[in-house]
Image (cartoon, rainbow, N blue to C red):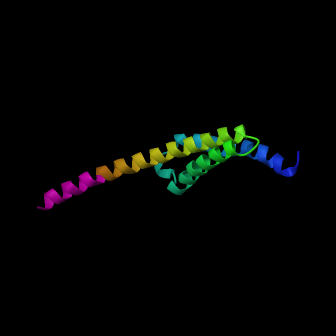
């Protein structure tokens, strides 16, 4: 097996570390998550999942880790967005209350 093929088949195995790290972040509060980081994880997972089914020979290890990366990234983005949206809704209610007391 030449060098490129060795990297082609072993690199996804190391990408599982990123996916596992993202899973361990499920227990962290959403405000500690980063939109750019999770967006990069989700989008790169989708891109590489598609690529792994086009390349010959098909790389199913790369496909599975890429689907896992995109799934964890999308889940983390949803958690962060939900938390940020809920906070903004609560702040709007506070602002309306303050305006009512000033009138």
Q: Is residue 88 above or below residue 17?
A: below
Point out the residue furthest to the bottom here.
102
Along the line of sight, which residue is nearer the eye, 26 or 60? 60
Residue name at image x 14 percent, y 57 percent: 100
Residue 18 highlighted magenta (yes or no):
no
State which quadrant residue 91 falls in: bottom left
Residue 24 makes an appearance in the image: no
Q: Position of residue 72 (x, y in %)?
A: 56, 42
Point out the residue furthest to the right here.
1
Quadrant location of the C terminus in the rendered image = bottom left
Q: Is residue 97 above or below residue 56?
A: below
Residue name at image x 50 percent, y 51 percent: 32
State which quadrant residue 96 falls in: bottom left
Left or right: residue 60 compared with residue 43: right
Along the line of sight, which residue is nearer the eye, 100 or 67? 67
Left or right: residue 1 compared with residue 20: right
Residue 45 makes an appearance in the image: yes
Left or right: residue 82 compared with residue 64: left
Q: Position of residue 33 (x, y in %)?
A: 51, 51
Residue 95 highlighted magenta (yes or no):
yes
Residue name at image x 54 percent, y 51 percent: 38
Along the line of sight, which residue is nearer the eye, 53 or 17? 53
Point out the residue furthest to the left here.
103
Tell me how many marks there are: 0
Along the line of sight, which residue is nearer the eye, 20 or 98? 20
State which quadrant residue 54 falls in: top right
Quadrant location of the N terminus in the rendered image = top right
Q: What secondary structure predominates along the stretch shown in magenta?
A: helix
**Chain part drawn in magenta:** 91-103
């Amino acid at each position: 097996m030449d060098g490129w093929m060795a990297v082609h088949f072993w690199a996804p195995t190391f990408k599982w570390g990123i996916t596992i790290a993202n899973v361990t972040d499920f227990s962290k509060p959403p405000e500690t998550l980063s939109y750019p980081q999770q967006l990069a994880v989700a989008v790169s997972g989708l891109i590489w999942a598609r690529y792994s089914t086009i390349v010959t020979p098909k790389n199913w290890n790369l496909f599975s880790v890429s689907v896992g990366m995109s799934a964890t990234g999308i889940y983390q983005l949803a958690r962060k967005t939900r938390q940020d949206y809920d906070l903004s809704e609560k702040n709007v209610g506070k602002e309306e209350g303050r305006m009512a007391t000033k009138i």
